[in-house]
Amino acid sequence: MPSFARISRVGKRRSRAACLHAGQAKPNYDEQRERGMRSITSLRIRAKADRVGKRKDGRRVKKDFMFTNKEHTLRGIMATILGVISLTSLVYIIVESYTKAGEIPLQYGAVAFLTMIFAFVGIVLGVLSKSERDKFYFFSYLGIVLNVLVLAALSVILYAGAYA
């Protein structure tokens, strides 16, 4: 009988030691999950920032670190590039037309038509990139705004040319 009791105690101690180790790891994981962080390193950085919360003059210091795996959308970047190309082409056409008093070659009209196509494609790419989840949307919005600006400028030019 005593040997059975000894074995069972040893078994309990082993399981208890395993539970203590698991218990130490679990709160870190739960805290990490609650704060939305990716690694124990980021959790330690956050803890250090919590300790260094105020300056000597009493003002609070921003102490939130957020590590994320989000990326910018590729379609949003392409929409922004198309918007920049379209806008610079349109500005160049307008400046050249102004300096030459309206006497410009027909190729400038083809460039304006291409900028309109680029703008439509850029808007479509920007809207499609906005529908992706867990991404940064800065370039999506920027691409949409630039391309809408190009289309608005082209619309004003065509309206002024038709009714002026």
Image: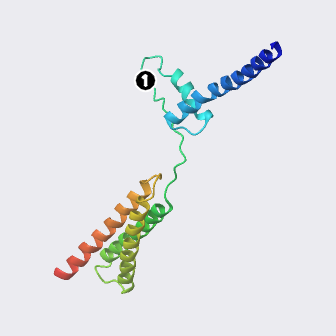
Decide: is 88 above or below 3. Answer: below
- Residue extending farthest to the left is 163
Dividing the image into 4 quarters, which one contains the C terminus?
A: bottom left
- Closer-to-camera residue (140/107): 140
Dividing the image into 4 quarters, which one contains the N terminus?
A: top right
Percent x, y of residue 126: 40, 63
Kindly identify the residue that appears in the image at 44 percent across and 57 percent down: 139
Decide: is 1 above or below 64. Answer: above
Q: Amino acid at mark 1?
A: Arg
- Closer-to-camera residue (71/95): 71
Percent x, y of residue 147: 36, 66
* Residue 44 seen in render: no
Percent x, y of residue 99: 32, 75
* Neighbours of disc 1 within 10 Å: few (<14), some (14-19), many (20+): few
Q: Which residue is mark 1?
A: 60
Q: Is residue 46 left or right of residue 82?
A: right
- Residue extending farthest to the top is 2
* Residue 84 seen in render: yes
Q: Secondary structure beneath disc 1? A: loop
Kindly identify the residue that appears in the image at 38 percent across and 57 percent down: 141
